[in-house]
Amino acid sequence: MISTIQYIKTPRLLLRKYERSDAQALAEAVTETLESLLPWMPWAKREPLDESQRIGLIDSWNDNWHKNEDFVIGIFSSNGEFAGSTGLHPRLGPEVLETGYWIRKKYQGMGFASEAAYAMTIAGLKLGGISTMVIRCDPANTKSARIPSRLGYSAKGEVYSEIFNTMHLHFELESRNLHSIDEFEPVEIITTSRTQ
């Protein structure tokens, strides 16, 4: 079960549920990266948030986590610095989880988005009770569109995204087509019950 995840460790990253104490680091990363987020992330148009709004946002993410409704996850570099955000989103129906990602400007171009998306793919397929992972992105976002193919996802065309109110490229990976990517291994998933 996804809600049992305490953290996920990859060779260069630590991925975990947000804590209230992450509010300042998240604010700094969003501010640093806002110009590159605005074309792709509708929520970026509501920035800047003040501290109480950002803490409220983290609280809402954690409420959704505890209700098993949505799982927003922070990405941290090996030195503990906030590096971006990802998640596992059950918004596309049963048997499917969607993941997405954004990376802080100072860490862009280093493969962190691919490494985080790979970890989310592993976690979703192992703990989500699903058979298919999905990544969607704007067709004009060519950097993000390269990541699913790198991870073994198949392009399935374009679909309308109600969340983003635009057409998105749609990529899928079925569990039987999952393959190991050595540079992102091992992926260690620590849950409240045991290591995966």
Image (cartoon, rainbow, N blue to C red):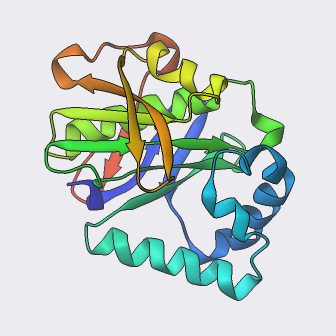
- Relative to 63, is 40 on the left or the right? right
- Relative to 20, is 72 on the left or the right? left
What residue is at 75 percent from the left and 24 percent from the top?
Answer: 109
Q: Do we see residue 190 in this rendering?
A: yes
Tell which of 75 and 163 is nearer to you.
163
Q: Quadrant of residue 177?
A: top left
Tell which of 78 and 46 is nearer to you.
46
- Relative to 167, is 40 on the left or the right? right
**Above or below, comparing residue 156 to residue 193 in the picture:** above
Q: Picture coordinates of residue 62 (x, y %)?
A: 43, 73
**Above or below, comparing residue 32 to residue 130 in the picture:** below
Q: Picture coordinates of residue 124 (x, y %)?
A: 28, 41
Q: Residue lying furthest bottom in this view? A: 52
Which image quadrant: the C terminus? Answer: top left
What residue is at 36 percent from the left and 72 percent from the top?
Answer: 64
What residue is at 22 percent from the left and 42 percent from the top?
Answer: 96
